Image (cartoon, rainbow, N blue to C red):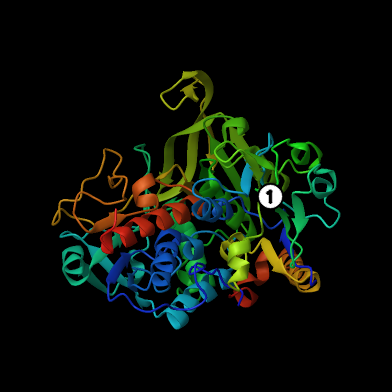
Amino acid sequence: MDKKILHVDYSLCIGCETCQSVCDFLHNGKPNIRIYYTISGLPVPINCRHCERAPCLEICPVGAISKDEDGAVIIDPNKCIGCLMCLAVCPFGVPSFDAKIKVVTKCDMCADRRREGMNPACGEMCPAEAIFFGMPEEVEDRIRARIAEKIARERTSYVHVKDVSRI
Amino acid sequence: MRGMRFAFFCREKPAPTGKRIAIVGAGPAGLSAAGYLVCQGHEVHIYDKLPEPGGLMLFGIPEFRIPVYRVREGYKELESAFEVKFFLRAKVICGAEKNEAGDEFVERTTSLRELAENYDAVLIATGAWESWLPNIEGADLDGVFPALEYLFRIKSAKLGHMDWKDIISPEGKKVIVIGAGHTAVDAALESLLLGAEKVYMSYRRTIKEAPAGAYEINLLKQRGVQWLELTMPVRIIGEGGKVRGIELVRTKLGEPDESGRRKPVPVEGSNFVLDVDYVIFAIGQTPTPPSGKDLNIAVDRKGRIVVDDRHMTSVEGIFAAGDVVTGPSKVGQAVRDGLYAARSMHVWLMGGE
């Protein structure tokens, strides 16, 4: 199994809510990634982190939670009994009880899309490139490159901006 | 590929349906709609008044929030892999010409009626480019700008579409930004980054009510912006036609108004004057549908295009989405509106319900 990661970088997120919109559209109005606004006014996207040692997977009493070939943590709706133990132990409060189908649902890293060779939609559309999907080393490399840009910006003082900052 | 994948519904262009769609406005709503529609096999042409697609993602929001390559590579993929055709520097009007922010680059106009006749469906996603300016003494002085125009010029220069000498340069100037939304924050931040001597921010409520959120305001304060909450402009003071200062009055919060927020009330006799060179108003924008009444597209009293639950306007076959329908919002809300409108258009075009 080649583990892939779906990483949301909170320092790059601009709170534009595009991820939530795209996920909403794909899941009929019930997005699996949502922006929450803290008391200080900071927008924070909350979504499944697809943990390596996932507490939800370990605690599920009926073994409804498993990992697929990309490392995505998946809930089997046919096995789920809706006990919400997964929600109780999730450090991010991710699992969500679907009142219609009476089971717990959550982000499956766009399983249908991955089967067709496409990537999770939130990452595809994030305007800020704050959501990354891929092999861990690729993602980490990309994140560092973004951080380098940020450091460069801090060092580019206004005096030079006209000469060097054309983009 | 590091661009936004607007056509995220499919890997490649599917078999054509033979339907042709015109989208007016290449911002987040228009481009997202285009992405959905090309994945359904429709031919999409996009008209935009700017020299490059992207709308405010490219020409309004600073590049340290939305990287330029995200938008550029994104629309280029639509162009190369999905054969979306862009008609740029082309402003679509509806019978009457009207000047709006961002018109500097327009080279030709196209009529909405013509588009409606030549395409199977049309989507209006023209956004909200008209800025509010208050009706106070001195608002017409040289040195008073809407924040959108201020940011638009700076970004146009950064993108290489405008000469740096044509921007409104804050270098060495004292600048006051009125408002506390995201546009106000960006205008204050760009002023700092481009070397303003002093940046003030005036807001008639408190940091707790600031639409951009306390976090963003606190960041600005940390970077040296002088935050003047509970103040509002009374008049702008000029000298030889140019801004020299601004008179503000302190406010206190009274009873809640229709928006549910406590209404700022001026405190009599608390006026004070600041020396400033630029006054930048970021107090809101209004929708800018194609101007004129050639087609009878209904708008509400706030200027927003009225649509039904299919996102269709009062004219059959013409749809609308994004800020021009919702009023100024966020990129994500425009994307969402664009996607849902596109799905309705697809259903309508294919004759389903």
x%, y% of residue B190?
59, 57
Q: Residue at x 78, y 37 (%)?
A: A85
Secondary structure type for disc 1: loop
Up-down relation of residue B21 to residue B128 (above or below) = below
Image check: A4 left or right of B160? right
User: Residue B200: percent from the left, percent from the top?
Assistant: 59, 43
Q: Residue at x 27, y 72 (%)?
A: B19
Residue closer to the observer: B245 or B13: B13
The residue beneath circle 1 is A47
**Image check: B107 left or right of A60?**
left
Q: Could you tell me residue B63's position as x and y percent? A: 59, 64
Give the tally of numbered discs.
1
- The amino acid at mark 1 is Asn
**Label 1 neighbour load within 10 Å: few <14, some 14-19, many 20+:** many
Does any portion of residue B240 appear in the rendered image?
no
Which chain does the residue under circle 1 lie in? A
Choose between B58 and B29: the one closer to the eye: B29
**Left or right of B61, for residue B23:** left
Position of B87 relative to B265 (above/below)? below
Q: Residue furthest toward the bottom?
A: B80
